[in-house]
Image (tube, grey):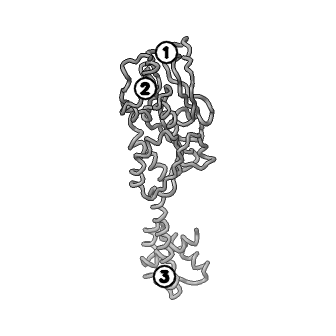
Amino acid sequence: MDRLAGITAFVRTADLGSFVAAGRVTGLSASAVGKAVARLEAELGVRLLQRSTRSIRLTEEGRLFHERCRRLLDELDDAEASLAHAVSVPRGRLRISVPIVTYHLLVPILPEFMERYPEVELDVDFNDRIVDLIDEEMDVAIRSGELPDSRLISRALRPFRLLLCAAPAYLARHGTPGCPRDLENHQAIRFRFPNSRRLQEWPLRRPPDSPEPRVRTVMTCNNMEALRQMAISGIGIACMPDFLARAPLSDGRLATILDEHLDAPGLFHIIWPSNRHLSPKVRAFVDFLSERLFATGCEEVPKAMPQSHTPE
């Protein structure tokens, strides 16, 4: 570093013709510039500048050295400019872990992100398994529920609601439940969390002393897409997020039940490891999701619930 400082002081002095002028552009005093050049000359064992009371001029050796040092400092300036550009422009591979269910939310908007940031390569892992971001070297992840890991930083994203849904044909055969207790006469398709193997609880609002309805489970699965499709096929009632149910509710393949008895707010978060610098690519993705999709509240879900059904 001392030698580089000496080279910089030497080049600026040769370019500007005085220690005073070189001091102005380097932020040093004229005396400090002169000492830096003197130390460089002592290290090299050659005089680079011919000094007089009126002027400073390059020696023959100094002229040769100045040409090489000028190119060296120009290359250094270019390298610094390239680095500043690299750390300010989002670029590189971005590894993202997301639940399969968010496919319907992310896929429609990812092309817009890629067009906006063409130097970012997306590596998206749609997987219901909860990955360890640090051990598996993921940059960001989208999750819902509690986030107990203190090694992670999170930003709240899109809220959602859980709905109980069934096919109109199923409700025509079994009747439409009027209260949670009526579920005891129905069949359930239940979601099983991949990591804990725990069954998802249905978010029914009940009095404190009221037991949970005993619904007969006819199928469990660890994939929300499969759960939705089985509900559409008419084998039972399933619990799913509002955005996943939107399309089949709109076209009549599913109907909601017991809406007034559900207490099911949820929230997605985007998370990243706290021990990593928030790189431009990560910041760009976090800001993009907040701006483009998840910053909005729960969307109104179409109501496709039949007025009444009676068993055959």
**Residue drawn at (50%, 32%) of the image:** 230
Q: Nearer the viewer, residue 151 or 293?
A: 293
In terms of secondary structure, where does tag 3 sit? helix
Amino acid type at image mark 3: Glu
Residue placed under numbered mark 1 in the picture? 182
Classify the position of the N terminus by image quarter: bottom right
Residue 76, horizontal then vertical, whole percent? 50, 70
In terms of secondary structure, where does tag 2 sit? helix
Query: Disc 2 vs disc 3: Cβ atoms closer than 8 Å?
Result: no
Quadrant position of residue 81? bottom left
Query: Residues under labels 2 and 3: Cα distance?
Result: 86 Å
Amino acid type at image mark 1: Asp
Nearest to the eye among marks 3 and 1: give it: 1
Mark 2: few, some, or many residues within 10 Å (few <14, many ≥20)?
A: some
Q: Nearer the viewer, residue 205 or 41?
A: 205
Mark 3: few, some, or many residues within 10 Å (few <14, many ≥20)?
A: few
| Mark before the other along the chain sequence, 3 or 1 | 3
Residue 113, horizontal then vertical, whole percent? 41, 51
| Mark before the other along the chain sequence, 2 or 1 | 2
Residue 257, horizontal then vertical, whole percent? 43, 22
Depicted 202 relative to depicted 295: above or below = above
Amino acid type at image mark 2: Ala
Residue placed under numbered mark 3 in the picture? 67
Depicted 170 relative to depicted 182: above or below = below
Depicted 221 relative to depicted 33: above or below = above
**Residue drawn at (51%, 88%) of the image:** 60
Residue placed under numbered mark 2 in the picture? 169
